[in-house]
Every structure is written in C-alpha cells, then in structure tokens.
Amino acid sequence: MKNPKTRLREYLDRLIRRFLNTKSLHLELKRISGWQIPGKIEVFNLGSYFFELAKYSLWRTILVEMAMILSPKEQVSLIDWLKKAREHAPSLAPTRYNPSYSGVKREPIKPKEYRALIDRHINRLDAQRDVIHRIK
C-alpha cells in the first residue's frame, strides 16, 4: 500500500461517516417511535401504514449497514481496517492523549503496543460474533 497513513485515515473517515449515517437513521427511528405514546398515538395511527413502512425500512437499512461495517468479507469494514492498521502500524505513527506526557504534542504509541491494542479490539469483535451473525 502506497502512503498507508493517508490511505488508512481516508478509509477510517469512510467508516466513521457510514457509522454516523447509521446512527442518524437510528435517531429518526426513535423519533417515529416517540409518537407511539399516549396522547400522541392518535396522530401516529392516522399515518400508521406510512410510519410502519418507514420503521421497517429504517431498521432494515440500519441492520444492513451494521452488518457491512462489521463483516470481514466486505471491502470497507472495521475488521479489514483493523487488520490493515495492524500491518502498517509503524507507518501510521499512532498517538494518544496523555495529560501527564512531557511533550508538547500527543504521546506516541509504539508499534508493538499499537498492535496489541488492535488485537484486543479484534478479540472483542470476535466475542460478539454471534450477535454479528444474527444481524446478518
């Protein structure tokens, strides 16, 4: 991979945008469901066919997006990004916020430590494999 730092940051930006879009869809779903309370249910019932179709479509879109983000088979997925970040750890020059760090900027993370961090995240995702499989 040429210029892995730039390419992986762009890749991560795409993943973040997809996640934020999915989160936005979930908020819209919650807004619709908010009309199903006493005092507002009459309004919901007037457009119930539309609202039920919208809720169904939003849930399907959310689940498909989450399955794609978490699937190791997708071209653009969190697992794929983690594997590439692990491979190119030295090129990424990762840093973290540490208020007690003596430097002016952020504290650098050693590639070995960064790989261990990535491995922990991959293991956490693997621990949720059943949930991810049900989403798919």
Image (cartoon, helix red, strand yellow):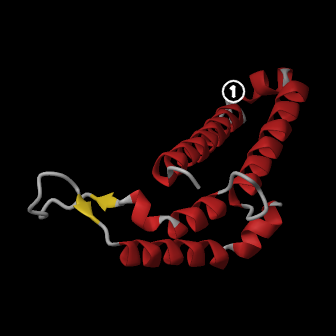
Instruction: Answer left or right for 80 relative to 58.
Output: left
Q: Residue at x 74, y 47 (%)?
A: 65
Residue 98 position by quadrant = bottom left
Nearer to us in this view, 104 or 43: 104
Residue furthest to the left in view is 102
Q: Which residue is mark 1?
A: 40
Residue furthest to the front in view is 2
Q: From the viewer's perspective, is residue 124 above or below residue 97?
A: below
Q: Residue at x 49, y 47 (%)?
A: 9
Mark 1 Cα-neighbour bin, 10 Å: few <14, some 14–19, many ≥20? few
Q: From the viewer's perspective, is residue 120 above or below residue 43?
A: below
Which structural element holds mark 1? loop
Residue type, mark 1 in image: Lys
Instruction: Answer left or right for 23 relative to 63.
Output: left
Q: From the viewer's perspective, is residue 75 above or below residue 89?
A: above
> Measured from the top left, where is residue 50 in percent x and y?
87, 25
Q: Residue at x 54, y 47 (%)?
A: 7
Nearer to us in this view, 50 or 23: 23
Quadrant of image for the N terminus: bottom right
Q: Residue at x 86, y 28 (%)?
A: 48
